[in-house]
Image: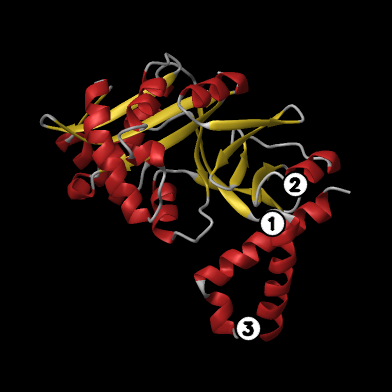
Amino acid sequence: MVKEDIIDIYINAGFNIKKVNNSHFLRKDFILYSFPTLMDFKLDKILINKLKWKSIITNIKINSKIKNTNEYILNVTNYSIETFSSKTRNQIRKSLKECIFKRPSLNDLIEYGLKINQQTLERQKRKEEHLINYRFWPNYISTFYNNPNVIVLGAYIEESMIGYIICYEIDTKYTILHPFFDKGYSSSNPMLGLIYTLVNLILEKENSILLSYGIESFEANSSLDRFKRSLQFVPIPATRVYIIHPLILFSLKILVFFIIKFGSSRTKRKKKVQKIINLYQGYRIIKKTIR
């Protein structure tokens, strides 16, 4: 698919996508995201000046020499079970033995998928209505499911779907979406089997695969990063910047000044404080990059 195809899918799925100066942005609550979110975006002063009044924060992935995050990328021609560490090999074998991996029915995605989403987002302390609200979920998942260019895989034990994953390709790079599973079946490692099956399914048709597991979370998540590495995803330095509404920016600058000037080492290590500092650093990259 090309960029316009995935934009159409998201619009049909119920998302609010804005167009500013011929560029697309996905709105979630009070935040804008350059869209597609994993494509490098070109910024200029005119667009920055427009965006800073459009939302509280605009989150944009750009190509810059200054790096402040990582995108986890799998780039392989062979994904056979022998290429993994012994621990991961055994976990994948267990998953393949205990689970069945196949394209799920739409009804299973609507019923079991909703429950898995609610469990997952509650654990992650996130609230995304299109994933957890029955009013929006059927239309959302149907839009992806019915598109022939989107891969949907489910993990089953007996008749129950215990996990699923969505994948699509934009301009030669595949993207993973919603790698969710029921925690009650963690011992069966369904996500390992899903990703292993997905990658080999694509490699059956193509000589190689370039697959993104997304950008690092705003908050450090060492266990998730270890999981990605165990599946041969490599952290590739990337740049994520933030355009901040002027009124918010004024308060943010004062807050960061006091944190740096008077904050103790313990205070600076707190997650909330780290988020504030990371946000400000992402804003500063724009100042250094766009002249």
Residue 173 x, y percent position in the rendering = 56, 28
Alpha carbon separation for disc pair 3 and 1? 20 Å
Identify residue type, mark 2.
Ser
**Pointer 3 and pointer 1: residues touching (CB < 8 Å)?**
no
Tell me the element at label 3. Answer: loop
Residue under numbered circle 1 = 282
Residue 37 x, y percent position in the rendering = 59, 37
The colour scheme applied to this rendered structure is secondary structure
Q: Is residue 141 above or below residue 89?
A: above
Looking at the image, residue 157 sits to the left or right of residue 83; the answer is: left
Task: Answer with the quarter of the image where residue 92 lies.
Answer: top left
Residue under numbered circle 2 = 64
Looking at the image, residue 152 sits to the left or right of residue 234; the answer is: left
Task: Answer with the quarter of the image where residue 116 lies.
Answer: top left
Residue under numbered circle 3 = 263
User: In the image, which is nearer the foreground, mark 3 or mark 2?
Assistant: 3
Which of 75 and 35 lies nearest the eye of the viewer?
A: 35
Looking at the image, residue 108 sits to the left or right of residue 241; the answer is: left
The mark that comes first in sequence, 3 or 1, is 3
Looking at the image, residue 184 sits to the left or right of residue 67; the answer is: left
Identify residue type, mark 1.
Gly
The mark that comes first in sequence, 3 or 2, is 2
Tell me the element at label 1. Answer: helix
**Pointer 2 and pointer 1: residues touching (CB < 8 Å)?**
no
The mark that comes first in sequence, 2 or 1, is 2
Q: Residues within 10 Å of mark 3 (few under 14, many from 20)?
A: some
Identify residue type, mark 3.
Gly
Q: Is residue 227 above or below residue 99?
A: below
Alpha carbon separation for disc pair 3 and 2? 30 Å
